[in-house]
Image: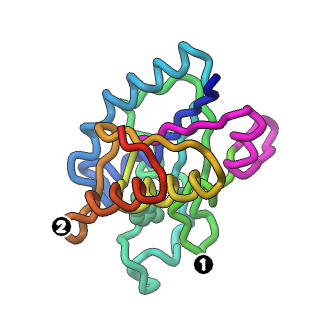
Amino acid sequence: MEHPALIIVDVQNDFCPGGALAVPEGDQIIPIVRAWAEDFFRQGYPIVTTQDNHPPHHISFGERGGPWPPHCVQGTLGFALHPALQLPPHAVCLKGEDPDQDAYSGFEGLVEGPEGHREPLASFLHRASVDTVYVAGLATDYCVKATVLDALKAGFRTIVLRDAVRGVDVNAGDSARALEEMAGQGAEIR
Ligand code: VGL
Ligand code: ZN
């Protein structure tokens, strides 16, 4: 039997319209992501959100020569999950906390456990006997792609939920190319 988990990547205010680094139409995935989450919760399968959790002067910010405006700064509203997401109980994986290192992939983050215990996403999934990950969220051409490629490298069967991801498309076609690259590495695009 399949042991799936749902990974919801970075559906944070700063990546949605009105946010500091908005993904066009990023909020349009929200009802779809919610429906997947409800379905996983009903079946008792784990749900993990990843969240960019940058310190105020993170290396990826323009002030330090990085490509992005300040976004998802620790403790700000931009860091919070979009309020319409309304998820059932889920684990939270925080990433991008090292001021001097970027971290696009959820597999570079740590899952928050009870009593402040934190563990890498892969160990969390392995402990839950997960063998298949379903991936939704933002942005297709950055954090979704990096998370999917790392999931494949870690040996998980990996399914990308096509209607539940959106990309930045800094260059036209980036998201389409990202999906091709993920499929080329073995991801199923569904
Ligand atoms: C992301 C750019 C910078 C993402 C995170 O979640 O895709 N993109 N930080
Ligand atoms: Zn970031």
Q: Nearer the viewer, mark 1 or mark 2?
A: 2
Query: Closest to the observer: 163 or 37?
Result: 163
Q: Position of residue 9 (x, y in %)?
A: 47, 46
Query: Which mark identifies residue 32?
Result: none
Q: Which tag, 1 or 2, sits closer to the chain's start? A: 1
* Mark 2 Cα-neighbour bin, 10 Å: few <14, some 14–19, many ≥20: few
Q: Position of residue 6 (x, y in %)?
A: 53, 34
Q: On the rendered image, what quadrant is the N terminus found in?
A: top right
What amino acid does circle 1 point to?
Asp
What amino acid does circle 2 point to?
Ala
The residue tagged 2 is: 172
Q: Position of residue 3 (x, y in %)?
A: 64, 28
Q: Is residue 61 above or below residue 186?
A: below
Q: Identify the residue at image location x=28%, y=54%.
A: 23
Confirm if mark 1 falls within 8 A of ligand 2: no
- Is residue 115 covered in magenta? yes
Q: Identify the residue at image location x=75%, y=39%.
A: 113
> How many angstroms separate mark 1 from mark 2 (CA)?
29 Å
Magenta segment boundaries in residue numbering: 112-136
The residue tagged 1 is: 100
Mark 1 falls on what kind of element?
Answer: loop
